[in-house]
Image (spheres, rainbow, N blue to C red):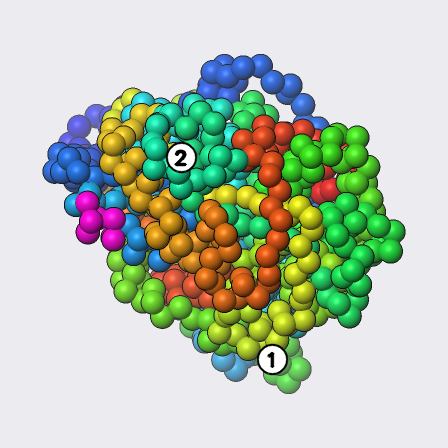
Amino acid sequence: MDRPSLLRCTLALGGVVLTSAAAGSVNLVMAQSRPPQEVNVYSGRHYNTDKALYAEFTRRTGIKVNLLEGKDDELIQRLRSEGSRSRADLLVLVDAARLYRAQQANLFRPIRSSELNKDVPANLRDPGGRWYALTRRARPVMVNPAQVNAALIRTYNDLSRPELKGKLCLRNRASVYNQSLVADELVRRGARATAQWLRGVVANNGQPFYSSDTTMVRAVGQGQCGVTIANQYYLARLLSGENAADRQIAQKVRVVWPNPTHINITAGGVTRNASNPAAAQRLLEFLASPSSGEGYAAANNEYPLRGWGNNPTLRRFGAFKASQVSMEQLGRRNREAVQLMTQAGWQ
Amino acid sequence: MLSAWPKGDRRLVLVVAVVAVSLLALLPLLTLLWEALIGSEAAAMELGVDGADQVRGTLALVAGEGLAGAILGTATGWLTAECSFPGRRLLRIAQLLPMAIPAYLLAASLIDWASYRGLRIHGLGWAIALLSLANYGYVFLLSTESFAVSGRRLMEASRSLGVGPWRCFFRVALPIALPAIGAGVALSAMEVVNELGAVRLLGVPSLSAGILDRWQVDGDPKGAALLSLVALAIVGVLIAGERQLRRRSRRWNLSGAPSDQPLWQLQGWRAALAVVVCALPPAVALLIPLVWMADGWQNLNVQAWSELLPLAMRSLSLALAAAGVTVMAALLLAIVRRWSPQLGVRQLSFVAGLGYAVPGSVLALGLIVLGGPLALSPLLLLLWGYGDRFMAVSKQGLDAAFERIPPSVDEAAISLGSAWSDVLRRVHLPLLRGPLLVGALMVFVDVVKELPLTLALRPFDFDTLAVRVFQYASDERVGAAMAPALLIMLFGLIAAAALVPALDRR
């Protein structure tokens, strides 16, 4: 081969190789220089205020927190694929169904902590000590009183009343929030009653299924929908936001607390292959403690693990009676719930 | 394929190189199929009701967007390349604006903006409209380049023979530009097959969402692999169709020489119509997010300003590195396509472009499975993923450009004793400078917008602009998403501006 052509080939391939080598060595250097006191967190939450809490943890303990935020399902899959090579120490996920999925994939390591057992109510943690709730969220009914008489609705079951035909708006079946809500009904009322309820609910649905709670809550405020089911923080966000138009729309929405109200959690657990499980447990205990738990909840207008917290917007919504179904059961019945929703025509 | 080869020309080097690049591109896909089909428990290999809906949804999107994108891209490509009307130069550049704006941003901002006003943006029609808007730029870029550069002599001849503009377009320019248009449509359609955020927001069932849900939510990797195969088949058909089209309309010409021939002068209502056709798509694409931002500016999250600089730097460096790697690999494949007589090697280079078909998040999983045992750094995996995913973007344009260089040029060079590398350096590269730059910039813009791979493969504390926008938007916190979204658009616009000289050669 003559020189120029050799040169060109080397260049073409060399570029790729060089880039890889450079990236690899940078990583190697980073890996080697990692001090022992660090904890790596995979989190399904994306709040800048979380970082302030992590910084506070670092200030108190000297343990540095490295963060990788992503979508819950993606993080679960990533952790599964990484297997024993994973660098994650703590996994934070939103929703019982996903926690159960991660638990079934054997991603968590059971831990024992009297602090966590004290701070986290029994139905909000895994009986096996694999994950512990950090915040609570509720999924109440939201009503536009000009369209729908709020007194009609005392339980989720009332959403299947024929009077609500065409007035109900629903988020799609892919939403894990609705899956967990249906699982809650399933645990409390059994498959037959739930299937019947689902048929009624789907028959009342008056709009194509929504893909987000916020647009649905706005639609209720504007009167295109009379009633919907949405997580409380979406309405709280619109009410306490800077946007005057949104505030005006949200003022027209009334929260109706079904008895009991479905609640769900954000929770964390030490990972199976954590290289620093002790630090991960400390961080978990820190986040679940009432003082920092309040901050974790406030970031997203959520409820702390006990009581209603100090968030003025949430206090305006009033108190509710939370469903006592354990988070573990919600996860266990998720698949069945999705099947029932599919059969009922919930898209 | 050439018959005459000079003595001492080692094509073996090319073959080895192309096999290496193709293997790199195929490895994640093969790993994935292996994982899904062999490495897991048996699950029913059936589409089911949801699967059938997802196939139908994606096919409808591809058909609708393909048609709308082809018409829009060709019309704007022709008008701004060959016709003269007020604002032509500016409008020519403006066609690049929509490419800078991610489809998920268009969808999210339009849905959000409309829901303030009590309007519901939902369903297939809107999805086709928004995806066409976001992706017709591929057709525009490739077709307009072809209109402006190739067939000039033929066109001039036709015009001197008194052939009118319409006949000239349909009988001369369009057939010559068909490969480029086909390549553009194929690219934009592949982008549609891969689109996740926008179609999900708009409630259209799609293969990309189905693959992800089956894999991650249902824990059914076999089902995901089955849907991936359907997606691969659709993209395979797209690529094959585009190649067929190109083969049928194979016409070479060497021009590049600037022409003194005046453009078609449009006047009166014709000029007005041309302005509207060319101004509307970029204006709409730009106005959707801007009006939304202006409307909700009170929500603009000021706390987050300090994170913008590192986010932007990471997006920028990833995009630059990916553009470099991808274009080099694509050039290699394109060279081999031209020089190598072995059919197998040519097929390999074709298959290497298939990474574009695989939803980014699935490709990411393949790379994670692969990357672990090889102890590769996450950043390297990420670059690998980008290269795999966007190979087709830079390769399609290069292939089309190579087609336009007549083999007689190569043959002449070879008969004068040049090796392929000499021909590459002295003949091809100068002629390919435009398409190479266009390819690199398209990859750059794509990487800045790219989401699933970045989301799945980035290391700790390495968020990018797109990642932030997505995280905020998926929390339905649109205010916080605005600032990084604005920066993504800005980068896209800067890249688009860099494309101007390539477009403006004439």
Q: Chain of mark 2?
A: A
SS at circle 2: helix
* Depth order, front residue of B245/A283: A283
Q: Chain of mark 1?
A: B
Circle 2 is placed at which residue position? A117
Residue B476: x %, y % from top left: 52, 58
Give the side of residue B320 with respect to residue A290, left or right. Answer: left
Q: Is residue B189 magenta?
A: no
Q: Residue at x 62, y 49 (%)?
A: A321
Up the image or down, B6 lies above or below A215; here it is above
Give the side of residue B423 with respect to residue B481, left or right. Answer: left
* Depth order, front residue of B385/A144: A144
Residue A228: tell me if it is visible: yes
In this picture, which residue range is highlighted in magenta? A55-61
Up the image or down, A318 lies above or below B187; here it is below
Q: Amino acid at mark 2?
A: Asn
Q: Residue at x 79, y 30 (%)?
A: A192
* Label 1 environment density (alpha carbons within 10 Å; few <14, some 14–19, many ≥20): some
Residue B131: x %, y % from top left: 58, 55
Judged by depth in the image, the label closer to the viewer, 1 or 2, is 2
Q: Amino acid at mark 1?
A: Ala
Q: Give the number of the disc on residue B271.
A: 1
Give the side of residue A14 with respect to residue B261, left or right. Answer: left
* Label 2 environment density (alpha carbons within 10 Å; few <14, some 14–19, many ≥20): some
Residue B37: x %, y % from top left: 52, 18
